[in-house]
Amino acid sequence: MPEDAAPAATSRPLSARKARLCEISDRWAPERDAFVAKNQAFHDDDRRFLRFLIPEGLRVLEIGCGTGGLLAALKPAKGFGIDISEPMVARARAAHPGLDFVVGDIEDSATIEALAGPFDAIVIADAIGMLDDCQATFASLRPLCHADTRLVVAYHNYLWEPVLRLAEALKLRMPEPLTNWLRPADIANLLELADFEAVRTEWRQLIPKRLLGIGTLINRFIATLPLIRKLCLRHYLVARPRPMGERENLSASVVVPCRNERGNIASIVARIPRFCDDLEIVFVEGGSSDGTWDEIVRVKADNPGRDIKLFKQGGKGKGDAVRNGFANARGDVLMILDADMTVAPEELPKFYAPLATGRGEFVNGTRLVYPLERDSMRLLNRVANHTFSALFTWLLNQRFTDTLCGTKALRRRHYERIAAGRAYFGDFDPFGDFDLIFGAAKLSLKVVEVPIRYAARTYGATNISRFRHGWLLVRMVGFAFWKLKALP
């Protein structure tokens, strides 16, 4: 779509409310950026969080783009903006010549057909309030999506409606016609009806002014707390296209970090089911003193019918071993199996299935559903696991009942995106669990939990120091709050 593209074709007249919206937008287009400046704190915070949700360098479509400031702030590799107002679009083109803007009504099928999809992200910031039929509009966006597209809907809390109308009367906010009153649950329901699946919901901005820094502090450290967040001005919902459930025949790599696990190696290879046509087992050995490396070499030689690879770990910690294994694995699906055999290898097909059908994008095991074997987990560990699970469910806005279960699975393409964005979190996690969990949360991947039966270790001793590593987990909660709640 060239920068001087003509207005999009239309196949039907505007509704009375849309015509009123167009009239208001055309009239106030010259003042649009001045209104943004009057509410700079709100718009800065809004754009910062949307940049957190939508990484740079994607193909992005913004519906209701106005003068293009938000789309430009997202720094897309290819950015497309659509707005019903021709004067708004003219200003957007002039201000952002590197982006493509078109005049059109997103509820018109001719407009949809003229857009060059698919897009990696579709943003609807406030424009949902102006739609005549939200469900039909969401459904019409499906052809513009691929499997990993994220639809991001940003809207205001309807409880703030009187305040917003007062701001319009005082000419502190651009006027608009009567808008739809939609809570996050309403938007999620409309998306469900249109074959989208809500992945996460966030609330921001309890005070949309800086107030000499006081508003900023409250928004960062108080506004996102449970209960209080429901009073925030702004809410964000991220959704993905609902998969059709067709099972793909994906190759898989099972990565097994191991240190002093000699007695378990043969059982691991013997018990991993052949749950897909192309399956490899990748052992990453971390400086054992019990002959684990030699045992892996022996077992590999004794099993020529299995694709077994083995590598020496260069760094320290399970996290380093997992990254080493993933870097050397070739499967479409990457899986982690702890060598202590506390999670049975026979459970792995349960982790593969949601990825092969698309029902999940990050599969996390949970040990806290079925009864535990005696001595498999101490009471203090169980209490800590439940506590951390509740905290991380809030921090990540997706359900996590057991963040510390070592068995996890995801697609290679998603792991590569997590690895590419690892600089945001840094090298903070010796376990490797939270490196993946936080990365998946930032990408708004769909998390699926698989209940597993947790057994007591039968060989060797745990490599985890309960109190030292427990303190590290406490620090991770603070780290996650800063990176996922306060900083964005």
Image: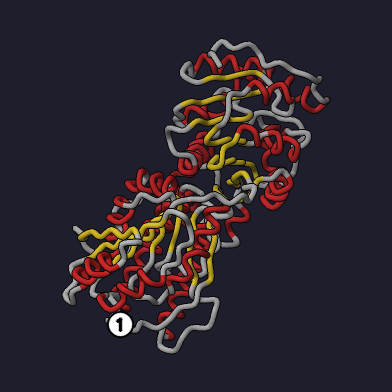
Say left or right for 253 vs 119. left
Residue visible at 77% across and 35% down in the picture: 178
Which residue is found at the position 69% from the left and 45% from the top?
195
Say if residue 107 shows up in the picture: yes
Q: In x, y percent, where is residue 386?
A: 49, 75
Q: Give the side of residue 198 with respect to residue 304, left or right.
A: right
Asked whether the viewer can see residue 484, the reply is no
Q: Is residue 258 above or below residue 157?
A: below
As helix, strand or loop, the secondary structure at mark 1 comes to loop
Badge 1 is on which residue? 459
Image quarter of the N terminus:
top right
State the image quarter where residue 31 is shown.
Answer: top right
The spot of residue 223 in percent (x, y) is 53, 54
Q: Residue at x 74, y 19 (%)?
A: 23
Which residue sits furthest right? 16
Mark 1 is on which residue type?
Tyr
- Where residue 158 appears, as percent x and y from the top left, is 70, 46
